[in-house]
Amino acid sequence: MPTRVGLRVLGNVNPSVRERVVEDLARAGLDVDSDPQDQHKLPGGRSCLVVFDHLTGEVFDELRMAGTWGRHRVLAIALPGATLDNADAWSLLRSGASDVIMWDDREPPMRAVAARLERWAEIDHSHR
């Protein structure tokens, strides 16, 4: 059974880029809810991807809100063009991201993303 994951795309991400990300994640075996109406109502334990093209206050606000959603793991994914240094990555983690990944179009990290989400799901399931 595929791992179900919510997807929040922040910033001015081109719709074709968003579509490609969703397709890549689906090919990696993830069941992507690419248009969640209300992330606050995600079932407990479900992971969420926060994808962004520029590091803005909106990204940090979204991650901080994730802490109020209950038992959710949030993977922050910076798309090509977003610049992150080590301090930015640590700030994302402090704001609520469980991990941070840079998306590289030459080697899209969808398998690594899927593996991480599946591992998180297994850990969460074993602790119930």
Image: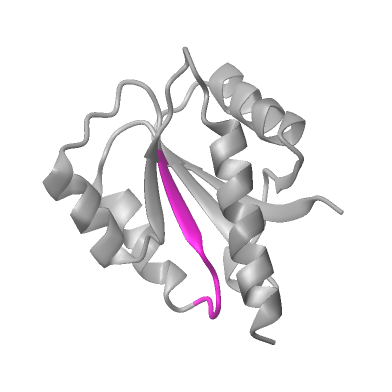
The single residue placed furthest to the bottom in the displayed view is 128
Residue 31 horizontal side relative to residue 38, left or right: right
The x, y position of residue 51, in whole percent, is: 46, 41
Tell me which residue sits at (56%, 42%) in the image.
113
Tell me which residue sits at (45%, 79%) in the image.
68
Q: Which quadrant holds the N terminus?
A: bottom right
The x, y position of residue 82, in whole percent, is: 29, 28
The x, y position of residue 119, in whole percent, is: 61, 59
Look at the image and tell me whether residue 46 can be seen: no
9 or 119: nearer the eye? Answer: 119
The x, y position of residue 2, in whole percent, is: 81, 50
Look at the image and tell me whether residue 128 can be seen: yes
The segment highlighted magenta reads 69-77
Q: Is residue 74 magenta?
A: yes
The single residue placed furthest to the left in the displayed view is 87
In the rendered image of this protein, does residue 110 appear above or below residue 96?
Answer: above
Residue 38 horizontal side relative to residue 33, left or right: left
In the rendered image of this protein, does residue 81 appear above or below residue 76?
Answer: above
The single residue placed furthest to the top in the displayed view is 106
Quadrant of the rendered image containing residue 72: bottom right
Tell me which residue sits at (63%, 75%) in the image.
124
Residue 26 horizontal side relative to residue 56, left or right: right
22 or 118: nearer the eye? Answer: 118
